[in-house]
Image (tube, rainbow, N blue to C red):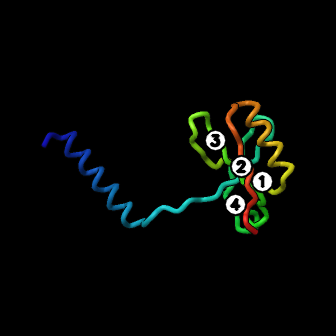
Amino acid sequence: MKGATRKLVELVERARAVGREQGPLVPVEALVTIERDKWIWQVVDREVLDSLSHRLIFESNNGKRREILMTACIDTAVSAASKIVELDGGCVLIETLEP
């Protein structure tokens, strides 16, 4: 085995070993606050998650769906959905989150 190939194999093996030690990945909920040109990312605690009431699902022109954000009230959800459709087209579904 050549040196570069051996180093790559060692790197892959080390990454797999670390992955086994860490266990399965879990999603981390994040909150983004946008003020003018600043985007502030924060990890969301349980209290904030419990206050959210609506989820926005974006459906692209090719039919793929993805969750894009959650809001704390219907007015914010409608406003965000309207702006997203205006900017990007497609379709935005607003779902009520289970209490």
- Please identify the quarter of the rendering in which residue 81 is found: top right
x then y, percent, for residue 26: 52, 62
Alpha carbon of mark 2 to alpha carbon of mark 1: how far? 8 Å
At which x and y percent is residue 34?
A: 77, 42
Q: Residue at x 18, y 41 (%)?
A: 3
Marks 2 and 4, the one that precedes in the sequence: 4
Circle 2 packing at 10 Å, graded few (<14), some (14-19), many (20+), is many
Residue pictured at 76% horizontal, 56% vertical: 54
Q: In the rendered structure, are the residues bearing label 2 and label 1 in contact, judged by CB atoms less than 8 Å apart?
A: yes
Camera-near label (3 vs 2) is 3
First in sequence: mark 4 vs mark 1: 4
Residue 89 located left or right of residue 66: right
Q: Amino acid at mark 1?
A: Thr
Type of the residue with mark 4: Val
Q: Mark 3 or mark 4, which has the lower sequence index?
A: 4
Residue 50, percent from left and from top: 75, 67
Kind of residue at badge 2: Leu
Q: Are marks 3 and 2 in contact (CB under 8 Å)?
A: no
Q: Label 3 belongs to which residue?
A: 59
Q: Nearer the viewer, mark 2 or mark 1?
A: 2
Which mark identifies residue 71? Answer: 1
The span from disc 3 to disc 4 (Cα, nearest Å) is 25 Å
Residue denoted by label 4: 44
Q: Position of residue 96 (x, y in %)?
A: 76, 58
